Image (cartoon, rainbow, N blue to C red):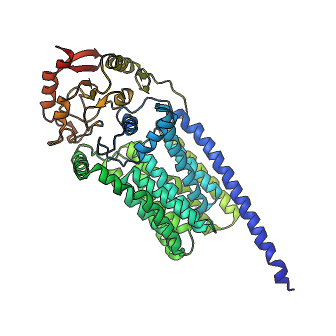
Amino acid sequence: MSAGELSGPAPRAEALQVGRRSAALALATAFALVALALVLLVPQTTGGGWEMDEGAVLAYAERVLQGDVPHRDFLTFYGPGNPWLVAGALAVFGARVEVERAVGVLYRILVVLALFVLAWRLAGLLAGALAALVSLVLMAEELVWAYATYGSIAFALAGLALAVLAVGAGEGSRALALGAGLAAGVAVLMRYDFVLAIVVSAAPLFLYVDSRLRVWYAGGFAVTVGVYLPYALVVGPERIGRVAGDMLATGSGRRLPLPLEATYPGRLLVLATVVALALVAVGAVMAWRRRGAVEGRIVLAAGLFSIGLAPWVFSRPDIHHIRPAAIVPLSLLPALLVFGAQELLGGRRARVTVVAVVAGVTLGFALASDEIRLPRMSDAPAVESSERAFPLSGARTARDVTRVVSEVERLSSPGESLFVGPLDLRRLNYGPTYVYFLLPQLEPASYYMELNPNTASRDGSGFVDELRAADWLVLTSRWDDWWEPNDSIDFGSAEPNRVVRDLFCQRVRAGQYRLYERCERAGT
């Protein structure tokens, strides 16, 4: 027996042992990151809620539980995936804001873990941990709730992470590729407008691999995205056309100018854009030069995903659009720098030195942000109905709305209809949509539960007829002085205001909120 035969199995066994230790260490790191994520994110679930945006998530989930279909029975510009998922959570754990926000926490934890995997496979465990930390710092800046955008980004990144693992896996590669396709499909169900970013970013990862992996990925993707086919039949062509028309009409009323570079959103946008472009350029070169290696394809996939979100970001470049899209490029920047330094310098000492430097830069970036806050639990005052509550930022507003909601509960009958919106109905830009969630016994009077510029107010929307048929109105003057540098400031038809004046009688006035009842119903 030759020396080679004697020594052959030992190196393989040693490599297997090292691989197992590395996997165990990565798993332990992932658990530690989840624990840290809970520490940073859970305190951010206790603040006052977004009255229309988060309110719509809750109200839409409630309508789904009562048998309504998104797009057919109420307008949403997102896919049906998020209302379905949140509705499932509310059905299992109870119709409470805390449950909905727990879904938001899970979305963000999925983002953290996916970025950890991508950076780990690119540049090692420390780089993976750095990517997770940067994403946590960015996401801990704001209230955590079940925003469909974070849900879509989370599942899209999970799909990329599973695809990366599939490329390097053995027997389990097909299952991982199938899971990657399923996750990417869920992301599209949540936000169909992200489909290009999701599909294009996955493509580099399946280059130079067994074609069967592509088939398994495509199969998983088709299974989930294919839900749109029967769903479209249920919604119907008339409603689909209406949604498309509303989306086109609202664009001019939502656009905002680019933020100044001196502001935090401006700095974040510039840095994220530069890094995203660098990821694409560097990733393309790396993937071309080393066609068999996965590292270049990881970089290219992350860059393509980030660039794919650019149309959405620049359609309304405020912090709430910039931050979610900035998470991917900024989180992977340390890993890219570490990988580049390893390639140029080589050696463990250089790697450790560079990781330390990058960690310092990352910490400096976090401390330089004037938006980042330390985790804290807040005690937001809540609007309360007999069974539900919704936290607000102002105690006086909470008291006023609670009074109005209590009167609606006392005076109304189940099955009657309610519309919630601004007092001056010439501008239908925003409204306290959460009130629908607090009063589930009442039917929404309008298809437009969530109000956006140029939608309910546009010709042919049918809103005025819906308003005439309503039983109850909850209107507020809080947004009557609305101003944005776009055509959302323009007044529309005065006909809705005339309908309120002619057909409805005021029952309660509490601060900026008013409750109206149909005069004929009230007997006056």
Name the side, left or right, on which 384 lies relative to 334: left
Quarter residue 387 falls in: top left
Which residue ends up furthest to the bottom in the rendered image? 2
Q: Residue at x 47, y 55 (%)?
A: 156
Residue 148 position, x and y percent, is: 41, 45
Towards the viewer: 406 or 152? 406
Residue 334 position, x and y percent, is: 56, 56
Q: Is residue 262 visible?
A: no
- Seen in the picture, residue 41 relative to 198 is either above or below; the reply is above
- Seen in the picture, residue 176 relative to 268 is either above or below; the reply is below
Which of the image's four quarters has the N terminus? bottom right
Name the side, left or right, on which 461 lies relative to 444: left
Which of the image's four quarters has the C terminus? top left
Quarter residue 518 falls in: top left
Residue 98 position, x and y percent, is: 50, 32
Q: Is residue 457 visible?
A: yes
Quarter residue 338 falls in: bottom right
Which residue ends up furthest to the right in the rendered image? 1
